[in-house]
Amino acid sequence: MPRGSKPGERRGGRQRATPNKRTVLTDRILAAASSNPIASSREILLILVKDQALPAATRIAIAQKSFGAGRSRFTDDRSERPVAHDLLATLRTLDLLLRIAQDATATPAERRKAASEAARCFLPKKPGPKKSRRGKFPPDEYGFSVDPNLARELRDAKLQLDCLRLSSKRLTPYAVAQKAGKLQARIKEIQESLQCPCPSKYRLKYDVDGAEVPGEIVRDAERLTILWKQHAEKKAFTAEEDLEEAIRMARYDSFLVGPEMAAGKRVTKLREKKRAADHGGPPLTRAEEVALRFLGLLYPPPRRSIDERTPAEHPFWDLPAEVEATPEPATGGRPFEPVAGSNGSRGSPRNGRSRPLGES
């Protein structure tokens, strides 16, 4: 039965210290250029195509890039013009690079750089999104994963930005502005690369038996405040506290600049614009109406209590303050009903008191 790999054990893939295809091609280009200093670029390319030390796939790539595929009789001449133009430009670039690689007066570093660029023409990098290193770090209980070194860099950049005002006496205003701009750009770049934690696990508050309990966001903010005070008091941090501060700050910042906060701000602005449009302001566009409809389902407005409602929204807003509840009679146990006032609304009882049902 196959077993799993041990820590540090490698199974498959290129072994350590094994050069890749582009490095092998660079070495062969340098060898061919050094052995044939007066050969033309076409002759060097033919030598590389016939070189048995190169893999067959690399030799095929050199042949396709250098000499091109034969023109088919079924293709139109006009469709071949862009291909011929690209091939000519590639050959001119390769000719210059190979001449530099053949130049004995150039330094070894310059010759190797030219050979490396020529190898890049034959074996270009495959375009595609850059793989994130986030998968190498296990997520925490909130679904947040981050590189500890990246989190420390974010924390240190924010600390340097806050301490710039203390060093403003030693630096000119222009130098302070330049340094602050670089720090802000780096902070924004790191924050945008972070993955926001799961909104169902990382919340602002919880409702427990009708009472609001602070959530993980509030606890992170409170803990960061304590750690920032330790920085101000110049207290020494342990390794655990240093890592905790960096992780908490990265998690808190990822939520502040993440999609949850952005969507909340967006729906708030749309609701304000809709309220203004209902009172004669500019109407919402079709896209804004659709965004408000869907964001309103995801982020409903908070439920207001009776104390938060305006008097006009209260069902008994016109009741006098001096009205007191009258106890139920001993017999009958019938409920009380407010009498309609002079304005036809409920809640203006006769003689300032409520009367039981059935009384005249």
Image: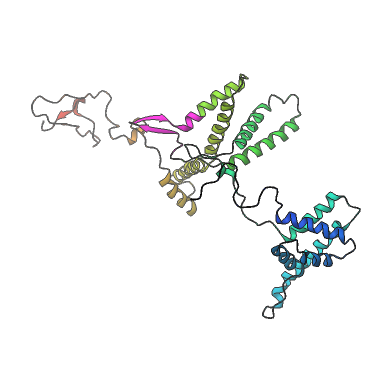
Looking at the picture, tell me which residue is in the foreground, 159 or 142.
142
Is residue 287 toward the left or the right of residue 356 in the image?
Answer: right
Residue farthest along the left direction in this orientation? 331
Is residue 133 toward the left or the right of residue 82 in the image?
Answer: left
Residue drawn at point x = 91 percent, y = 53 percent: 105
Quadrant in which residue 167 is drawn: top right
- In this picture, is 80 found above or below 175? below
- In this picture, is 117 found above or below 73? above
Q: Is residue 168 found inside the magenta-colored segment of the image?
A: no
Looking at the picture, tell me which residue is in the foreground, 318 or 124.
124
Span colored in magenta = 199-220
- In this picture, is 121 found above or below 139? below
Is residue 87 toward the left or the right of residue 187 in the image?
Answer: right
Residue 303 lies, in percent from the top left, at 37, 37
Residue farthest along the front direction in this orientation? 1
Residue drawn at point x = 9 percent, y = 24 percent: 330
Quadrant in which residue 121 is drawn: bottom right
Quadrant in which residue 89 is drawn: bottom right
Q: Quadrant of the C terminus?
A: top left
